[in-house]
């Protein structure tokens, strides 16, 4: 990134849910749907 860098990073939203079409915790699958929304501001040269 040269002389630039990350100015700030904010994790605004995070969730772990069963995959679409599955009942809540009713199946044996380990797969989950994870959603993360992150905002990162960079310094620009």
Image (cartoon, rainbow, N blue to C red):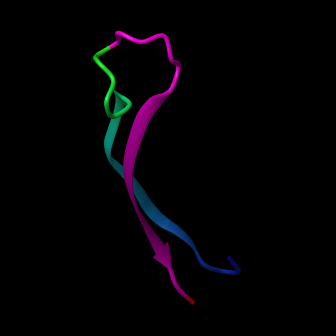
Dominant SS in magenta: strand
Q: Residue 45: where, in percent of width, then height?
A: 57, 90
Span colored in magenta: 25-44
Q: Residue 7: where, in percent of width, then height?
A: 47, 67
Q: Residue at x 50, y 26 (%)?
A: 31
Q: Residue at x 50, y 78 (%)?
A: 43
Q: Which residue is at the far front?
A: 21
State the image quarter where residue 21 is shown: top left
State the image quarter where residue 8 is shown: bottom left
Question: On screen, 41 above or below 34?
Answer: below
Q: Residue 24: where, in percent of width, then height?
A: 28, 16
Q: Residue 3: where, in percent of width, then height?
A: 66, 80
Task: Please tell me which residue lies in front, 23 or 10.
Answer: 23
State the image quarter where residue 41 is shown: bottom left
Q: Which residue is at the far bottom?
A: 45
Q: Residue at x 51, y 17 (%)?
A: 29
Is 26 one of the magenta-colored residues?
yes
Task: Please tell me which residue lies in front, 12 or 25.
Answer: 25
Is 27 one of the magenta-colored residues?
yes
Q: Residue at x 41, y 35 (%)?
A: 33
Number of callouts? 0
Task: Please tell me which residue lies in front, 25 or 4.
Answer: 25
Question: On screen, 12 above or below 41?
Answer: above
Q: Quadrant location of the N terminus?
A: bottom right
Question: On screen, 27 above or below 6?
Answer: above
């Amino acid at each position: 990134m040269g002389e630039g860098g990350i100015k700030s990073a904010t994790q605004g939203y995070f969730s772990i849910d069963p995959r679409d079409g599955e009942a809540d915790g009713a199946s044996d699958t380990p797969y989950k749907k994870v959603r993360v929304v992150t905002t990162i501001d960079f310094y620009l040269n």
